Amino acid sequence: MKIGVIGGGAWGTALASVAARDGEPVLLWAREPDVVEAINAGHENPLFLPGIALPASIRATGELSLSAACDALLVVVPTQFVRAILAETPVGSAPLVLCAKGMEAGTRLLVSEVAHQVRPEAAIAVLSGPTFAHEVAAGQPTAVTLACADEAIGQQLADRLASPTFRPYASNDVIGAEIGGAVKNVLAIACGVVEGAGLGQNARAALIARGFAEMTRFGLARGARAETLAGLSGLGDLVLTCSSTSSRNFSLGVGLGQGHAARDLLADRRTVAEGAFTAPVLREAAMEARVDMPVTEAVCALLDGADVRDVVEALLARPLTREHR
């Protein structure tokens, strides 16, 4: 199975490295010509994944048309660009493995729903879980969820990507795998705010637990299974991104907690903090589904420029209620 990877950022490059570990040929599409040149000439992506030696069997290209020669495509571009990229990419009969985490602005669709609209003929899978790109590329132990409604195709993809240090767990709950990845990015911003504002470890632990309750309520309302949300792509990813400055979303939250404006923090970034784009879309989707998501509401307020102290006071002043309802 020849793998193509659409997206030459840190995560796309790391996944290309996973797919090429046994010398298998992998085609990696990158938008930046200097990334293409560096990977082909020096087997490194110094712009997005510096210091990591890449397998020589990875070939980089700036031509999306070459993806037609691949047996499966990993789509690793930010959520808001997935629709346009898929419209341009020759897919043929290749399954699409979606690796972005978020919801499309305007439509409030999950990435799999966008892909199904644009490429209804393609089998759709979702790869999600607790992953930092530099650790995956360095061969450190990692486990992920690989969800596909067609379980036979999902197992083929899992077998192809598996290695002694990269362990995909198969699932057929595509919606659950996606919702975990989308919501945890928003919650990671909130946990970063706790860190940046110096609110303490008790507050962070409470926020993770209450945030997971939000994720579960929303996921169940959208048709996800509770066990998926409690697995690698939900709770596992939430714990990772809510506790490390290696998370772009957590780092954004730290800046917000320190009093910096969201527009300034986002303007100074080469890579995308998906949670900042997902938060307002998630709020709209939650309102539509009549799901209470106060932490998500708080993150939206902070991104819109609200004062941290005011937002925290408003959260703590909410009426007392039962933990499980």
Image (cartoon, rainbow, N blue to C red):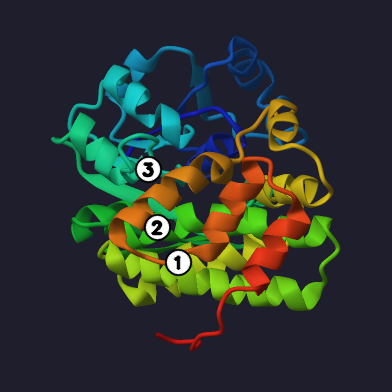
**Does 77 appear above or below 124?**
above
Asked if labels 1 and 2 touch by Cβ distance under 8 angstroms, the answer is: yes
Decide which of 126, 229 is in the foreground and name it.
229
Q: How crowded is mark 3: few (under 14 residues within 10 Å), some or many (20 or more)?
A: many
Disc 2, SS: helix
Q: Mark 2 points at which residue?
A: 179
**Does 310 appear above or below 107?**
below
Could you tell which of marks 1 and 3 lies nearer the N-terminus?
A: 3
Image side of residue 134 versus residue 175, left or right: right
Kindly identify the amino acid type of the residue bearing the numbered disc 3: Leu
Q: Disc 2 to disc 1, how far (Cα)?
A: 8 Å
Q: Residue at x 70, y 35 (%)?
A: 53
Instruction: Give the number of the mark in front: 2 or 1.
Output: 1
Asked if labels 3 and 2 touch by Cβ distance under 8 angstroms, the answer is: no
Q: Mark 3 points at which residue?
A: 98
Instruction: Give the number of the mark in front: 2 or 3.
Output: 2
Q: Disc 2 to disc 3, how far (Cα)?
A: 13 Å
The answer to which quarter of the image holds residue 27 is top left
In the rendering, at what x and y percent does residue 116 appear? 21, 39
Q: Residue 167 carries which label?
A: none
Kindly identify the amino acid type of the residue bearing the numbered disc 2: Ile
Does the image show residue 315? yes
Could you tell which of marks 2 and 1 lies nearer the N-terminus?
A: 2
The answer to which quarter of the image holds residue 89 is top left
Image side of residue 133 versus residue 236, left or right: right
**Does 141 appear above or below 109?**
below
Asked if labels 3 and 1 touch by Cβ distance under 8 angstroms, the answer is: no
Q: Mark 1 points at which residue?
A: 215
In the rendering, at what x and y percent does residue 286 appear? 37, 57
Decide which of 260, 113 is in the foreground and name it.
260
**Does 318 appear above or below 297?**
below
Could you tell which of marks 2 and 3 lies nearer the N-terminus?
A: 3
